Image (spheres, grey):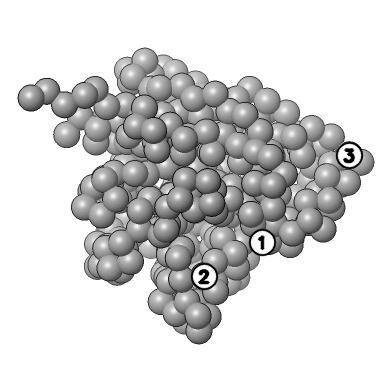
Amino acid sequence: MESPKKTTGFVYHEDYLEHDTGHEHVERPDRLRACLQALSRSDFWDQLHHIEATPATLDQIYYVHDRAHVDRVKLHCQRAIPLDYDTPVSRESFDVALLAAGGVLRAIDQVIVGNVDNAFALIRPPGHHATPNRAMGFCLFNNVAIAARYLQSEHGLDRIGIVDWDVHHGNGTQDTFYADPSVFFFSIHQHPLYPGSGLANETGNKTALGTTLNCPVPAHSSINDYIRVFEEILAPKLVEFNPDFILISSGFDAHRLDPLSTIDITAEGFGDLTDILLSISDQICGGNVISILEGGYDLFGLSESVAEHVKRLISHNAL
Ligand SMILES: [Zn+2]
């Protein structure tokens, strides 16, 4: 019997360019333009199922962030005052941040109803440094954390796995779930590097011991180092945790050209990590995976990595 045609969902909205981070900020609209250009020139562009982004509601943002944080972000955006030294905003940024989180939620809906098998959300601002009560590191709202809570609260799923391969530690995501045994959080990141957290001994507080897994790696680590961590450390823990859904915080700033790090990964390497995760997800959660853009600041390195990542998401469907 022929299986139904499978597809990969793709979230993008031109308003994501309206988060204006100022002249020469590395987290800039051109990042998405470069990715969009690489994807639209690929031979798999027509195979993507385009998903319309709509804004997350404030109640959905409150799944993760306290009201004081949301009010502060809104006020800073209204006045275009930076949230911290690294995190400038424009008047549009609050609405763009709601649309970024909401785009991820729409992708989730499409996977849950079975219209797509997996999805990639080409969004900004990124999210994984935003803690429940603080914006930092270019991040206003924690998109992946909101997605995990949405899966639990509005789709009734129990256990969520988050894999964060951005080159920086996902401190905001870790903080959100540090005492929550229903969400497994894994981060592989260069150390020492911003924000400085994510040591191997940070494994969850006593109510959730073992559901946070940090694998800091030194400068100049290679794809083989990453693959070893994924296969020997992450895979058994993720299988044991047995999530219903896997969310990827997919930053591509571990690319060898990235200006913010010194890790030696190519686009092909990100493709290989994608394959590893997809085969784990097949075993434990029926391939339910959504990948959410975080960092990645070299326009060529980012865009070729995103294209390879999305290509592997699509080609996995054909297996
Ligand atoms: Zn990063």
Residue 53 in percent (x, y) is at 58, 28
Asked whether, in this view, residue 228 is left or right of residue 94, the answer is: left
The amino acid marked with disc number 1 is: Thr
Residue 199 in percent (x, y) is at 50, 76
Residue 49 in percent (x, y) is at 40, 22
Residue 12 in percent (x, y) is at 55, 27
Q: Secondary structure at mark 1?
A: loop
Q: Residue at x 64, y 46 (%)?
A: 60
Q: Is residue 302 above or below residue 162?
A: above
Quarter holding residue 314:
top left
Q: Secondary structure at mark 2?
A: loop
Q: Residue at x 56, y 60 (%)?
A: 173
Residue occupied by mark 3:
78
The amino acid marked with disc number 3 is: Gln
- How many C-alpha atoms fall within 10 Å of the one at disc 2: few (<14), some, or many (≥20)? some
Q: Residue furthest left?
A: 1
Query: Which of these two is toward me, 245 or 192?
Result: 245
Quadrant holding the N terminus: top left
Quadrant holding the C terminus: top left
Which label was assigned to residue 131? 1
The amino acid marked with disc number 2 is: Asp
Quarter holding residue 32:
top right
Asked whether, in this view, residue 105 is left or right of residue 247, the answer is: right
Residue occupied by mark 2:
180
Q: Is residue 38 above or below residue 236?
A: above
**Mark 1 / mark 3, whichever is N-terminal:** 3
